[in-house]
Image (cartoon, rainbow, N blue to C red):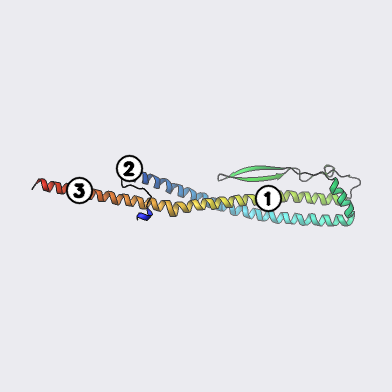
Amino acid sequence: MAETILEGAHPTRMELLSVRNRLRLATKGHRLLKEKRDTLILEFLRLAKEASATEEAAQAQMKKARTAYAISAAQAGQASLSSAAFATATGQEVEILRRNVMGIQLPTITARQAARRPDERGIGLITTHPSIDAAAGEYESAITELVKLAAAEESVTELSEEVRRTRRRVNALEYNLIPKLKNTQKYILMRLEEFEREGFYRRKMIKRKRHT
């Protein structure tokens, strides 16, 4: 038992009271952490499923965008596409917010005005072939989906790390601290009982000597 008790534990009643309080708190903390771990796992599975669906939507939209680009290249010509690309207003702002999930701040990323009107793209409406606007619109929709995917993947990654951290804390309590506290409690009780028996034996011996 000496290897499985708390280091520096003294067999006193004050120590016993302290160990009992620590054991009570550790047991309560273990229960709460297990509940948190289980909730995080459920949320992780839900977010992983959402991320998978978002990835499929992003891939589908990118396929549509590439198809629109190929059609535009065939109809308007590669030179017109390149000219429109250089003339298009560049830059894309994103808004990053955080939402609280079991004490974890998970990101929510939104592309601001990813989908623009033809007159907001900075290219001539009259001189530009309609297929170029169509291709631009598809790629702008793809940006929206890719931004959603980035947020979903980041959330899954952060939640996965938190699940691992919480699992380690649960295991540390379950397999290390709580067993040591229980063993220490047993050790102190055993030693106190030994002291009590020794004291009883000494008192008995003293009484015998007085009556002899």
In the figure, is residue 24 to the left or right of 155? left
Left or right of 151? Residue 126 is: right
Q: Secondary structure at mark 2?
A: helix
Q: Label 1 sits on what residue type?
A: Ala
First-in-chain label (3 vs 1): 1
Residue picked out by circle 2: 14
Q: Position of residue 47 (x, y in %)?
A: 62, 52
* Percent x, y of residue 191: 29, 50
Residue 77 falls in which quadrant of the image?
Answer: bottom right
Verify CB contact (< 8 Å) between mark 3 and mark 1.
Answer: no
Residue placed under numbered mark 3 in the picture: 200
Mark positioned earlier in the residue sequence (2 or 3)? 2
Q: Residue at x 69, y 51 (%)?
A: 149
Circle 3: residue type = Phe
Residue at point 66%, 45% (across, down): 108
Of the numbered discs 1 and 2, the one sitting upstream in the chain is 2
Distance between the alpha carbons at the discs numbered 3 and 1: 73 Å
- Residue tagged by mark 1? 150
The foreground one among 97 and 209 is 209
